[in-house]
Amino acid sequence: MNKAPLTAPHRLAANDSYTFLMKELEKVDETILEPLSGTDWPRDMPVITGGGLMENIAAIDVSYASTGGEDDNLFFDAANDIPVIQADMAKQVARTFNFAEYMAFSVMEREKMMSVGRDPETFLNKGIRLHCDKVIDRNVYKGFTKVSSTGLCNNPSITRTSAPPHTSGGTDTQWQYKTADEILDDINSTISALWRDNDCSSDALPNHILIPVEQFGLLVTRKVSDDSERSILTYVLENNLATQQGGELIISPCKWCKGIGSSGVDRMVVYCNRVDRICFNLTQPLRRMDTEYAEMRIKIPYIAQFSEVRFLYPSTVRYLDGI
């Protein structure tokens, strides 16, 4: 005997029961899967925090010179021309940039989310802080095209040289074609040139090198030779000029070094990671402003302010392109 088909009310009840059953069998993971995103500026760039909202950050440069025809300034009994020391002072100005963003949600939306233990302000607060952190990251390494600012990796005032080709012949300059000794020579040549440009001052010895992620992986995975257990990275860290002079060199991967050199080649950045050599100012850390209520909606503004990268001693930074 054939059964009569379900009427509309019966079908509705069956569907509702199935939906209810599925919800009962579903377990909600309390973990919130946020975007995977990283910023490295706290590792690579000294920051001076505080000061409040302002227009510019100024520093005073001074250079010294002595009158007279000889640099030695030797004074003899019969001499009557005593050299005079002179100071040439100039002001170095860095611009500041404002960051502003707000979150907005309706009162009803908040009530609904709060009923299941979720607060929209918590989520959106994390989003704003992540966005601000990424903006600062771009400011530190690359700057902003719309305001013609530059960062640590692309300042046109910094001395730049091109990597030499590998010695086995050809024109390839990339590290993937070079031996451990050739890579070490590229690094030591850049360090020595920077050191020489600063009168071989111990305070000018670089302590930090940034290279693209791919080149860093090459240094980590490739061995010095087939019969050696040491990686090229270990070999370079032990035998570079800065370490041999009593310093400590750090080589770090940096995504911003990829393709930022002349004609789109990869770049190595060698510099002195010290707050009195290079830095930027975070004059106003990200701050929550007063909550605004309008037409059943909640708006919460956030502001921050930071300066462009301040190259206090541009001669303590150097680029090597084509690695």
Image (cartoon, helix red, strand yellow):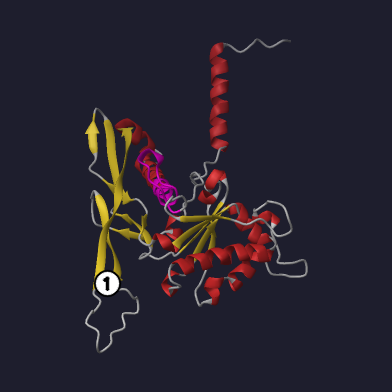
The residue positioned 25% from the left and 76% from the top of the image is: 83
The amino acid type, in three-letter code, at marker 1 is Thr
Tag 1, which secondary structure? loop
| Residue placed furthest toward the bottom | 77
Q: Which residue is mark 1?
A: 67
Q: Residue at x 33, y 33 (%)?
A: 105
Q: Quadrant of the C terminus?
A: bottom right
What secondary structure characterizes most of the magenta part? Answer: helix
Residue 83 colored in magenta in the image: no
Q: Is residue 268 left or right of 56 when viewed as pictured?
A: right
Instruction: Please give the range of residues in magenta.
Output: 133-152
* Quadrant in which residue 244 is drawn: bottom right
Residue 195 to residue 131: above or below: below
* Quarter-of-image position of residue 292: top left
Q: Is 146 colored magenta in this rendering?
A: yes
In this picture, residue 2 sits left or right of residue 18: right
Instruction: Rate crowding at label 1 as few (under 14), some (14 to 19) or many (20 or more) other CA atoms within 10 Å.
Output: few
Foreground: 20 or 170?
170
Front-lying residue, 183 or 108? 183
Q: Residue at x 52, y 77 (%)?
A: 245
Front residue of this view, candidates 160 and 311: 160
